[in-house]
Amino acid sequence: MLAIRLLAQPDRLDVLALPVRPVTGAESPAEPVPVAAALPDGVADEAVALAPAARLAGTPGEVWTQVRPGGVPGRLLLLGVGAGDETAWRKAGAALARTAKDESHVTLALPADAPAAAVRGLVEGLLLASYRFRLGADEKAPALAAVDVLVADPAAYADAVDVARTTAAMTRLARDLVNMPSSVKNPEWFAGQVADATAELPDLHLRVRAPHDLAAEGFGGILAVGSGSASGPRLVELDWRPADARTHVVLVGKGITFDTGGISIKPVPAMKLMRKDMAGAAAVVAATLGAAALRLPVRVTTLAPLAENMVSGSAFRPGDIVRHYGGVTSETTNSDAEGRLVLADALAYAVRELRPDVLIDLATLTGANAVALGKRTGALYSENDRLAGDVLAAVEAAGEAAWRMPLPADYVEYLGSDLADLYSAPTQGAGSVVAALYLREFTGELRDRWVHVDMSAPSWSDGDDAELTRGATGWGVRSLLRWLATLA
């Protein structure tokens, strides 16, 4: 990752960035923000003159580059920081990472009164916007290797930088897992990546159930979905159990490493990006690793049911009856609605065996998520107003987006089956809502302490935008770490 240092005074000034903010009711729409560090002679006055001449508005992420041949610094960047809050600084950091991608080093001076949250946002923006995933040589890889951040008291911001660096590292890990092509990424490979990451952190406990374990314990949903693939399914159980934990949270993430739709096969355009169908599993695993790295005093158990939904003679069929963990049965007439089957097993196991205080699942579950809310917003479901509000507040603070959706009682009748306990994929009703109602049937006594997030749409970005880069977004990692920190 990009190297970031906190300094009181610069030790090099090849490229210097200064913050600019909007001004209300003044002749110039923007002005430089007074900074903590001493600047080279004339630079502060030059920035004051440049802001109106460049017609800067000071909006977050706006950048003006001034070349100064023979001067120190050689390049002066004016960086819009808006209101100077965490969100604005996150956008500013992302814009700086992109603007300075051809430089090797940048020095950024911060205001003397910058809050710790602003530094956290800045560092997250820098590290997330500079992310790239590529297999093989990348001739267009950014040259930017280091950013020095000038502040009045570096020690005062050290914790904020550490939290931001860990949050960004885990988000980048989730992006790596999702971006990896499915020619490499199968359930066994994913479980191996979790094992490798776990080995680097103390006090984490990992159990991986192989197909014979799943069969012996009755995980029929995971086995059914994985039955058509030569790569057998897995169930990853990762546990962070600090001694001082007072709350136990179980996170469940859908982990379909590739989804052809099975016998209900997808059209090619819909299948092309199905390597991202395990983004929920990537997010909850990365969040648990982040909780351990940050030593958060909350117990977190992650369940990642992993399967590859393929077409073959052994694939499960439309109309099959699936027996889930605990004995509940589902009639499935659409093998492309496979995610809810693996999640049902994991939810039932969590309720029956782990008995947590709170149960949250993340899943790239339905295309209806994007139809209802667009490409940047997850659909959140919960019967608990306070829990839903707390999670949504954490999502907003993290710079991600979710919207609470209803769980209408009149849709429940669509889940009725003549052959089984439940009908897993009704065609009636709203797709994302009905899928959430189906999952709710497996939450048992935790029904009023459960949150489901359908995050299919925001798990992927079609282009670079602020801290997002084209491809996997790592959606949910930042939000979960924010929320888990509030339980400390």
Image: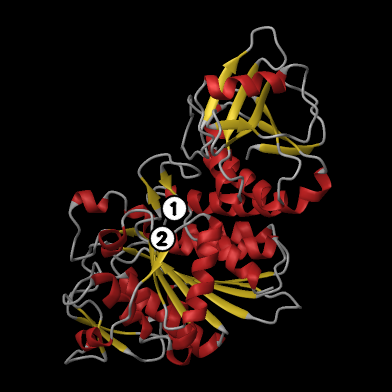
Decide: few, some or many residues near mark 1? Use Cα within 10 Å; few <14, some 14-19, many ≥20.
many
Q: Where is residue 281 in the image (x, y as percent from the top left)?
A: 46, 64
Q: Work out whether residue 383 can be spotted.
A: yes
Left or right: 425 in relation to 242: left
Q: Position of residue 194 (x, y in %)?
A: 56, 60
Q: At 35% across and 87% down in the image, what residue appears? A: 441
User: In the displayed image of the protein, which residue is found farthest to the top?
Assistant: 70
Secondary structure under the numbered disc 2 in the rendered image:
helix
Quarter of the picture holding the C terminus: bottom right
Q: Work out whether residue 102 can be spotted.
A: no
Secondary structure under the numbered disc 1 in the rendered image:
helix
Q: At 25% across and 87% down in the image, what residue appears? A: 412
Label total for image: 2
Quarter of the picture holding the N terminus: top right
Decide: few, some or many residues near mark 2? Use Cα within 10 Å; few <14, some 14-19, many ≥20.
many
For residue 278, the mark is 2
- The answer to which image quadrant residue 285 occupies is bottom right
Specify the amino acid type for callout 2: Met
Mark 2 → mark 1, Cα distance in angstroms: 7 Å
Q: In terms of sequence position, does the residue under pointer 2 or pointer 1 come before the other?
A: 1
The residue to which callout 1 is attached is 178
Q: In the rendered view, tell whether residue 259 sits above or below residue 488.
A: above
Specify the amino acid type for callout 1: Val
In contact (CB < 8 Å): disc 2 and disc 1 = yes
Q: At 43% across and 41% down in the image, what residue appears? A: 465
For residue 200, the mark is none
430 or 280: which is nearer to us?
A: 430
Q: Where is residue 391 in the image (x, y as percent from the top left)?
A: 51, 70
Q: At 44% across and 78% down in the image, what residue appears? A: 346
Q: Where is residue 292 in the image (x, y as percent from the top left)?
A: 68, 65
